[in-house]
Amino acid sequence: MTDVAVIGAGPAGLMAAEVLASGGARVTVFDAMPSAGRKFLMAGRGGLNLTHSEPLADFLPRYREAMPHLRSAVEAFPPDKLRDWSAALGQPTFVGSSGRVFPKTFKASPLLRAWLRRLDAAGVQFAFRHRWTGWDDQGRLQFQTPDAARAVASKVTVLALGGASWPRLGSDGAWVDCLAAKGIAVSKLRPANSGFTVSWSDVFRDRFEGQPLKGVALTVGTHTVRGEAMITRAGIEGGAIYALSAELREAVLGIGQATLTIALRPDLTTEVLATRLSGTRGKQSLANFLRKAAQLSPVGIGLMQETAIASGRQLAVFSPVELAHLVNAIPVQLTGVAPLDRAISTAGGIAFDELDENFMLRKLPGVFAAGEMLDWEAPTGGYLLQASFATGAAAGRGVLHWLAPSRS
C-alpha cells in the first residue's frame, strides 16, 4: 500500500507530490498519459506564462466568485514563491512588459525535466498509462491500463485530473461521473478562455482570417478590457476575448448570443475623431482616408464595413460624426462558444462547498482535490497556472495534516 496516490501528473498533481514527498510521505503519481505534464508542455509552446507580477490585491480578484475559496492557497504559495521555486530548479524568471512572468528560457520543457528529476530524487514513483475509473467495493482505486484493470490500495488520494479542455492531452472530464456517483456536487464543465463564433461575411472572412486587432477595447455589458484579439475563420479569439469569456459565455449560453462592442481607437474621443474625419478626402479611397485620418488598420476598417452592410447602408454615406461614433462602438454579434475541447481552460468543477479548508472532500474522508477540476476560472496571464500550483501545494499540506495523527 502506498501512503498517497496522486492522480494526475499536471502542475497541481506534481506540486502536491512534491509537498508530500518533502513531508516524508510515500507518493505514487498515476496518469493516463504516457508521460507527465502533457498540457503543461502545450501551455509553454508560445512561452510559458507561469504567473503574473501584479500585487495580490489586484491578483486575487481575477478569480472572481472563487476568490474567497482560493485566497488562502494563493497567499500561502504566491507568485513570488512560485518564481523562487522555478529559480531553484535552475529556471530563473523575468517579468515581461505586460507584467506576466516567464522563465528566461521561455520554455516549459527544461522546467518540467528539472522538476521530474527533483521528484525522482525525493522518491516519488510514477505509474503512467493508468486511467482512473473510480473505486471498487473495497475502496481501492481502480485503473485501466493497456494490459488489464488494476486495483491500488492507498491511505490517501489526491485528485488532480484537470478540467475537460484539450482531452487528447489527458484532461477529458471523465472523472465527473466517478464523483457524481459518490454524491459529490460538480458544476457543469464549460469552456473558459475560449473563442466565440461570429457569422462573418465571406468577403470579410476570406480577407481578414488570422488578422489581429491591436490596442482595442472590448466591452460586454459593464465589463471592458483593453488588449488584442484575433479574427478567425469561425469568429474571434485572443487575450482580450479570453478576459471577457465568462461574461460572453454566459450570455451566449443564456440567450443564444452576445453583443461585443469593439473600440478601435479607445484613446480618442468621438469629438477628436469627428474632427479628423471631417477633412477633405479628395481622390483617396474611403479605406485609405480612414487609415490616414484615424490611423485605422485594414481589419478595423473591414469591421466597420461589416457593420455598415449589416445595417443596410454603405460606409461611404456615413457622415464624419457617424464614422467617429462607429470607430469606437462597433457591435459584433457572437453566436456561439468554441467547443470545450478547444478551450484553453475549463469553468465549472467540484463545488467548493464539498471541500473542507484542507481541500479534502467532506463526503470522502482521505480524498483531496486540487487544480482545474475545482470550480474556478481565471483569465490567461499566469492566473491559471498559479492557482493550479497553489491548490496542489495546499492539498499536499492538507494530506500531511491528515496523515499526521497516524504518524505520531
Image (cartoon, rainbow, N blue to C red):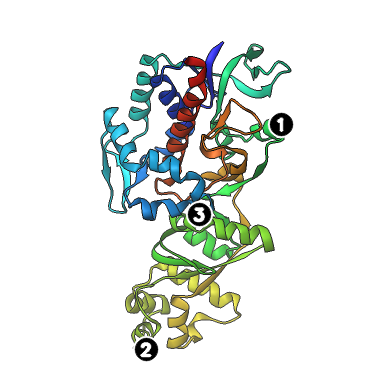
**Nearer to us: label 1 or label 2:** 1
Which quadrant holds residue 51? Answer: top left
Residue type at mark 2: give it. Answer: Ser
Count neighbours of disc 3 (C-alpha within 10 A) and say few if under 14, some if 14 to 19, many if 20 or more.
Answer: few
* Relative depth, front residue between 113 and 376: 376
Residue 226, above or below 58: below
Count neighbours of disc 1 (C-alpha within 10 A) and say few if under 14, some if 14 to 19, many if 20 or more.
Answer: few
Q: Are marks 2 and 3 in contact (CB under 8 Å)?
A: no
Residue drawn at x 58%, y 48% is 191
* Relative depth, front residue between 404 and 350: 404
Residue drawn at x 59%, y 25% is 366
CA separation, marks 2 and 3? 44 Å
Q: Are marks 3 and 1 in contact (CB under 8 Å)?
A: no
Q: Which residue is mark 2?
A: 278
Left or right: residue 308 versus residue 292 is: right
Of pointers 1 and 2, the one earlier in the residue sequence? 1
Query: In the rendering, at what x and y percent does residue 77 appear?
Result: 38, 38
Q: Are marks 1 and 2 in contact (CB under 8 Å)?
A: no
Of pointers 3 and 1, the one earlier in the residue sequence? 3
Residue drawn at x 60%, y 33% is 361
Query: In the rendering, at what x and y percent does residue 383 appear?
Result: 42, 46
Taking the image as drawn, is residue 78 in sight? yes
Q: Which residue is mark 3?
A: 64
Element under label 1? loop
Q: Looking at the rendering, in which quadrant would you find the N terminus?
A: top right
Query: In the rendering, at what x and y percent does residue 237 appear?
Result: 50, 55
Q: Which residue is mark 1?
A: 182
Element under label 3? helix
Query: In the rendering, at what x and y percent does residue 200 appear?
Result: 57, 63
Element under label 2? loop
CA separation, marks 3 and 1? 28 Å
Residue 309, above or below 173: below
